[in-house]
Image (cartoon, rainbow, N blue to C red):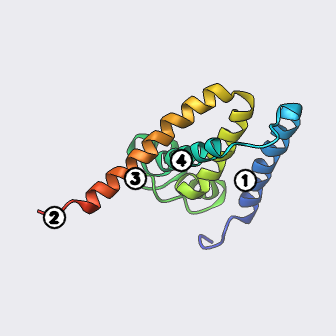
């Protein structure tokens, strides 16, 4: 049945996420910081927003979504099984954003300088997106 949710596949994705988190915590050990700064949190948040939108919505990343979607724009997940669960994950910027934020946070612990540079690039583009959207809304219609 196409209307049934792929609960086993959702559970597998959740277990993969949890396993990656547990593995990271074990790997990082003493490298874990006492706290993460507000600036790093904001930078990761903005970068996660931008990368999540890039993966889930942009044309240039259609190739990422295509194997688990049905339409040419790669926006509609396949109807069942693992392909549906993965399709729902990669076509939802909020859903994939959690995975992106986690990866960036792990990276911040292991490679702080490189991660700050990458999150600055994507965070800067996220700010530019907001400014562009505000400009379009504020611009009088012609």
Measure the C-alpha gap from mark 2 to mark 4. 29 Å
For residue 53, which numbered disc appears in the image?
none
Which residue is at 34% across, 56% downward?
A: 133
For residue 130, which numbered disc appears in the image?
3
Q: Which residue is mark 1?
A: 13
Q: Is residue 100 visible in this depiction of the protein? A: yes
Q: Is residue 117 above or below residue 12?
A: above
Measure the C-alpha gap from mark 2 to mark 1. 45 Å
Callouts 2 and 4 close, C-beta under 8 Å: no
Q: Name the spot of residue 96 as percent of width and height, x first.
A: 60, 51
For residue 46, which numbered disc appears in the image?
4
Q: Is residue 97 left or right of residue 133?
A: right
Which residue is at 77% across, 59% downward?
A: 11
Measure the C-alpha gap from mark 3 to mark 2. 19 Å
Q: Which residue is mark 2?
A: 141
Give the SS element for disc 2: loop
Q: Name the spot of residue 21 as percent of width and height, x first.
A: 79, 45
Which residue is at 55% across, 32% downward?
A: 118
Look at the image and tell me in which quarter the C terminus lies.
Answer: bottom left
């Amino acid at each position: 049945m196409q209307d049934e949710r792929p609960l086993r596949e959702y559970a597998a994705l959740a277990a993969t996420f949890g396993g990656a988190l547990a593995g990271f915590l074990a790997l990082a050990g003493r490298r874990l910081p006492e706290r993460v700064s507000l600036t790093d949190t904001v930078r990761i948040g903005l970068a996660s927003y931008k990368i999540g939108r890039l993966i889930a919505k942009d044309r240039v990343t259609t190739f990422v979504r295509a194997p688990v979607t049905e339409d040419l724009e790669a926006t509609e997940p396949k109807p069942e099984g693992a392909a549906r669960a993965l399709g729902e994950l990669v076509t939802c910027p909020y859903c994939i954003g959690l995975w992106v934020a986690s990866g960036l946070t792990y990276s911040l612990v292991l490679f702080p300088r490189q991660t700050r540079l990458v999150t600055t690039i994507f965070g800067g583009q996220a700010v530019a997106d907001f400014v562009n959207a505000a400009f379009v809304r504020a611009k009088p219609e012609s």
